[in-house]
Amino acid sequence: MKVYTKTGDSGTTSLFGGTRVPKDHMRIESYGTVDELNSYIGLIRDQEIDKHYKDILIEIQDRLFTIGAILATPPEKEVMKNGELRLKKLGILETDIELLEKEIDSMEDALPPMTHFVLPGGHQTVSYCHITRCVCRRAERLAVHLSHNEPVAEIAIKYLNRLSDYLFVLARKLSVDLKANEVKWIPRK
């Protein structure tokens, strides 16, 4: 199978199920941003961080592939001609969200309470977490925007929301683990 098909040369692409849409369609923007998010998660995973974080990030990457597949499937193509669900072995479960919440709670237990806003930075790995969090928020916004026009599984949006929280807390935790200089935001007087 060749990587190039030339079918997108005119500015269209196929969704799961074969429906062709323009490459700037909101569904493409949505799952394309989830793909970008997944790549940034890989960048964090490639850093010198605890193996536990790497294992959780691999799990997250797997879930993001699932969310990408959900977003790439238009509602009218969710059921195949033979009556089977196109994504029957894929899905985001409440337990996926609970894992993120458990990880957030565990990291927060090891951190001092937040008493101020934190400026992103202090260490390259921490900065990668903040960039990834921002991409995650954009993916969530795009999925919400798509949901105003076409059905989107609510649990996918919920997962993206919780993931951005996880990435924020991971950045804080890695600041401590890596002995990074955390810079507090000080408002003008």
Image (cartoon, helix red, strand yellow):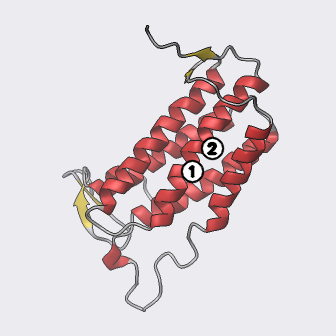
Q: Residue at x 33, y 62 (%)?
A: 147
* In this picture, residue 81 sits left or right of residue 112: left
Residue 170 vs 175, above or below: the answer is below
Residue placed at 71% from the left, 17% from the top?
Answer: 180
Figure quadrant of residue 170: top right
Q: CA distance from mark 2 to mark 1?
A: 6 Å
Q: Which residue is mark 2?
A: 166
For image coordinates 62% across by 67% down, the residue present is 94
Amino acid type of the residue tagged 2 in the rendering: Tyr
The answer to whether mark 2 and mark 1 are in CB contact below 8 A is yes
Residue placed most toward the observer, 38 or 135: 135
Residue visible at 57% across and 66% down in the picture:
92
Q: Secondary structure at mark 1?
A: helix
Instruction: Inspect this view and state whether residue 5 appears.
Output: no
Residue under label 1, please give it: 162
Amino acid type indicated by mark 1 = Arg
Horizontal placement of 81 versus 117: left or right?
left
Query: Is 21 placed above or below 106 here?
Result: below
Residue 169 at x, y = what percent?
A: 65, 37
Outermost residue, bottom direction? 82
How many numbered markers are drawn?
2
Mark sitting on residue 133: none
